[in-house]
């Protein structure tokens, strides 16, 4: 009997413990079900029952960097400071260790703390709320400050004021100011791309905003554990350019100096890698600072190098020579007799820029003396349709592969619209118009052994996940034979060594090929040529025995010197800097002299 009684309490204890254990297991299972298995469903239910709110989680617009990874444009976060006036006037309760010792910070005290951070006057901050409440006692929204820095935002957040919110706004920073500004473009105050590469490559740079939803109490405080990211933010990609930032800066300084020295309206210097077509610099003056684009007149905020075509003038004579040689219409031994002024087929009248008698010119001599009459007579030997077809193959009449916003296709009329005067004028760069990239593309083709590479400003776009797109094509198109390109290059070298500007363009140790051009400008109001107004060009490449870089210097309406001689000082300095910058090995030979006359 004693044994039975002693076992009964033990049995009851075991049973009791078993029941407790079962209950605990049931609670654990239910807890796992609520917090793990069906957590999403329960959070959604709680959000539906509470005071649900949401905020945007902003992605950052992608950076633009140069060929070496140097940042040219980047994004920073700035913040607005918003206040809930109704809650602000109630103040904030502060409790110490002893909750019976409660104090309240009043709105005037809080306004003074905010003002210390934002740099405003305390009375000004206080007035924002008092005015809002006076107008509407139930007011829930007012702006205290806009566009504050991240440091200011953090200082304000540390005040722990539940009635302050800090919606971020996108900020764009261009560390080098106006360096490359015409190419980079800019964004608006709302972060939307408005011009330049910012606009052209917006698909690469644009971010995608996310969203966070949460519950908050009636006092504005976010309830712990209720924040849920419903859509993640995705940062924009990094756009890598072909531009060299330091070279771009140098060319910008150089063209600004030359424009001012010559009294020109504007100017540009372009540097292109011969074998790849990559643009290493394209500096324009005047330029725009993307940090403050409205400080620049609207007509100067873009890149006129792409948008405004001009007559190329005598730089086109090299193209006519290349077409004639490649098509077999004449050879380097062919000669023509040309005076300084002649009337040609159909009554077309052609004149040279200097007076001379009848010269028996070689093709080289025509290029050296830049004879309009001489190149016109060589041009007579080439069928018009043949010249037109070659010009199209050289990329004229269509925008470049860069596809810059607003880029012009230039002006190239079909052959059936050519009269006799146009037939001749087009041999020496009149009666048509090209953009700077189109003209540079012609000389890139000659310098690259007759293979035309698509010009490029962008190396590629690297997305946030590491995917690389927008890589320029490495495939070129043969336009003329390597033999033709070599012969034209030799003739352009003789322009550099025998021409009137030989001493001004020489670079010790390097063989240089050049051609100048002085194009007449059209008055948009009358359609006729503007008197005494010219668009001047000097374009060339080096080392001519193994071309690496093409440099073009353009001046719009120079005044102190009105011919392409105005371009020579900047061209010589620009090409010298390019050869130095890329450590190009000097030529191992001198230019073979070719005869001017037959």
Image (cartoon, rainbow, N blue to C red):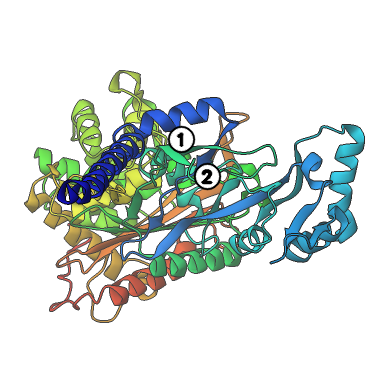
Q: Are marks 2 and 1 in contact (CB under 8 Å)?
A: yes
Q: Tell me the crowding category of disc 2: few under 14, some 14 to 19, or many 20 or more residues within 10 angstroms, Cα based.
A: many
Q: In which quarter of the image is residue 509?
A: bottom left
Q: Which residue is drawn at 35% across and 42% down?
A: 204
Q: Is residue 224 above or below residue 447?
A: above
Q: Residue at x 69, y 61 (%)?
A: 159
- CA gap, disc 2 and disc 1: 9 Å
Q: Residue at x 40, y 65 (%)?
A: 245
Q: In this view, does 98 lie to the left or right of 309?
A: right
For this rendering, which residue is in front, 305 or 310? 305
Q: Quadrant of residue 105?
A: bottom right
Q: In which quarter of the image is residue 109?
A: bottom right
Q: Tell me the crowding category of disc 1: few under 14, some 14 to 19, or many 20 or more residues within 10 angstroms, Cα based.
A: some
Q: Which residue is drawn at 40% across and 73% down?
A: 573
Mark 1 sits on what residue? Answer: 406
Q: In this view, does 100 lie to the left or right of 539?
A: right
SS under mark 2: loop
Mark 2 sits on what residue? Answer: 302
Residue 465's spot in the image, x, y percent? 26, 48
Most distant residue in the front direction: 1
Residue 356's spot in the image, x, y percent? 38, 55
């Amino acid at each position: 009997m004693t044994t039975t009684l002693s076992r009964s309490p033990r049995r009851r204890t075991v049973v009791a413990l078993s029941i407790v254990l079962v209950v605990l297991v049931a609670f654990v299972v239910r807890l796992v079900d609520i917090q793990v298995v069906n957590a999403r469903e329960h959070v959604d239910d709680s959000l539906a029952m509470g005071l649900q709110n949401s905020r945007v989680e902003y992605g950052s617009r992608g950076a633009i960097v140069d060929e070496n990874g140097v940042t040219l444009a980047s994004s920073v976060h700035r913040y607005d400071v918003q206040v809930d006036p109704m809650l602000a006037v109630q103040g904030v309760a502060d409790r110490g260790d002893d909750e019976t010792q409660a104090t309240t910070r009043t709105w005037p005290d809080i306004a003074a703390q905010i003002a210390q951070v934002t740099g405003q006057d305390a009375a000004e901050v206080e007035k924002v709320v008092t005015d809002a409440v006076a107008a509407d006692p139930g007011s829930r929204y007012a702006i205290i400050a806009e566009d504050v820095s991240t440091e200011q935002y953090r200082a304000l957040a540390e005040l722990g004021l539940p009635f302050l919110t800090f919606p971020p706004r996108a900020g764009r920073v261009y560390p080098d100011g106006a360096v490359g500004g015409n190419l980079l473009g800019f964004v608006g105050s709302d972060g939307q791309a408005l011009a330049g590469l910012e606009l052209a490559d917006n698909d690469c740079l644009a971010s995608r905003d996310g969203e966070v939803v949460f519950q908050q109490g009636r006092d504005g405080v976010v309830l712990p554990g209720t924040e849920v990211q419903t859509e993640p933010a995705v940062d924009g990609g990094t756009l890598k350019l072909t531009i060299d930032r330091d070279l771009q800066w140098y060319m910008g300084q150089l063209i600004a100096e030359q424009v001012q020295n010559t009294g020109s309206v504007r100017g540009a210097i372009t540097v292109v890698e011969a074998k790849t077509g990559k643009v290493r610099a394209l500096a324009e003056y005047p330029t725009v600072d993307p940090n403050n684009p409205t400080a620049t007149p609207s007509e100067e905020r873009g890149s006129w190098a792409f948008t405004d075509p001009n007559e190329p003038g005598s730089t086109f004579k090299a193209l006519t020579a290349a077409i004639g040689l490649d098509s077999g219409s004449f050879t380097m031994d062919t000669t023509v007799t040309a005076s300084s002024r002649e009337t040609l087929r159909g009554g077309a009248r052609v004149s040279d820029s200097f007076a001379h008698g009848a010269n028996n010119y070689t093709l080289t001599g025509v290029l050296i003396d830049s004879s309009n009459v001489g190149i016109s007579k060589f041009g007579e030997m080439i069928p018009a349709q043949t010249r037109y077809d070659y010009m199209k193959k050289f990329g004229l009449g269509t925008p470049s592969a860069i596809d810059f916003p607003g880029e012009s296709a230039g002006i190239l009329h079909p052959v059936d619209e050519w009269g006799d005067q146009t037939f001749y004028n087009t041999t020496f760069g009149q009666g048509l118009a090209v953009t700077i990239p189109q003209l540079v593309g012609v000389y890139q083709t000659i310098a690259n052994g007759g293979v035309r590479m698509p010009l490029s400003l962008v190396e590629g776009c690297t997305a946030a996940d590491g995917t690389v797109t927008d890589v320029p094509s490495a495939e070129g198109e043969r336009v003329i034979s390597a033999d033709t390109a070599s012969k034209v290059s030799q003739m352009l070298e003789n322009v550099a060594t025998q021409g009137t500007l030989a001493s001004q363009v020489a670079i010790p140790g390097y063989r240089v090929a050049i051609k100048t051009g002085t194009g007449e400008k059209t008055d948009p109001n009358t359609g006729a040529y503007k008197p005494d107004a010219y668009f001047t060009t000097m374009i060339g490449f080096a080392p001519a025995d193994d071309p690496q870089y093409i440099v073009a210097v353009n001046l719009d309406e120079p005044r102190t010197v009105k011919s392409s001689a105005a371009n020579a000082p900047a061209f010589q300095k620009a090409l010298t800097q390019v050869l130095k910058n890329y450590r190009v090995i000097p030529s191992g030979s001198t230019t073979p002299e070719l005869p001017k006359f037959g």
